[in-house]
Amino acid sequence: MQARIATFENRDVSMADELIGLVRSRVASGDAIPGADRHLLLLDPKNGAALGMTFFDTEDDLLAAGPAFEALDAEIPEAVRGRRIAFRSWEVALDELGDGLLAARTGSVDAPSWRVVELVYLVREQIATEAAELDGWRGAVLLVDRASGETRTITFWESDDALRRSEVREAQLRIRVAAEIGASVTRVDRYAVAVDSVPTAV
């Protein structure tokens, strides 16, 4: 499985409802992004940041969707969606999502490229397994770039309160895994899950 992650900044936070409505209507129409399996829109309600996440079965499906992403960006005003500052493709090494996703935490870890396989194993066997025992856990996604060693873990929670209560324990797990393979935790961010949709054809 592949994922495309687009990062936005300087979004007008007062227009969040309009952005959510536009994305949901396009996904519900069934023709927002051809070939997509799932869409997630994560919003930081304070600083105007946003992540648009779209999942595909294959890399070919992801590449073929390029024009549709450009058309969607052109359709949604920049003041509403924010300024797109980056987008990249990832391999999805773990995809275990339940229902009721309302809050998310992203953690970026840089590992030696030759230890990515070990990192994937540790995340699956330790972080995902142990974190799943925490109250409010709703699943996780692990994104990897095997060439560079960059990884991104996204954990999902039933509420912002559950996310905050899990902060210390998840940080301990992340640091432990990074230490075992000589990796470094480079960034941690928190978001509200604004859209979680599977495309439906009309």
Image (cartoon, helix red, strand yellow):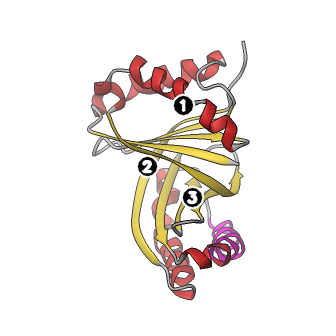
The furthest residue to the top: 202
Image coords of residue 145 (percent x, y): 56, 61
Q: Would residue 132 be visible to someone looking at this image?
A: yes
Give the Cα distance between marks 2 and 1: 25 Å
Q: Mark 2 = which residue?
A: 191
Of marks 2 and 3, which one's residue comes earlier in the chain?
3
Q: Mark 1 = which residue?
A: 66
Between tags 1 and 3, which lies in front? 1
Please state which amino acid type lies under the numbered disc 3. Thr
**Can you say whether 107 is above or below 31 in the image?**
below
**Can you say whether 186 is above or below 154 in the image?**
below
Please state which amino acid type lies under the numbered disc 1. Gly
Q: Mark 3 = which residue?
A: 155
Asked if the residue at tag 3 contacts the one at tag 2, i.e. Cβ–Cβ closer than 8 Å, the answer is no
Image coords of residue 160 (percent x, y): 47, 52
For this view, does 23 lie left or right of residue 58? left
The local secondary structure at tag 3 comes to strand
For this view, does 37 lie left or right of residue 89? right
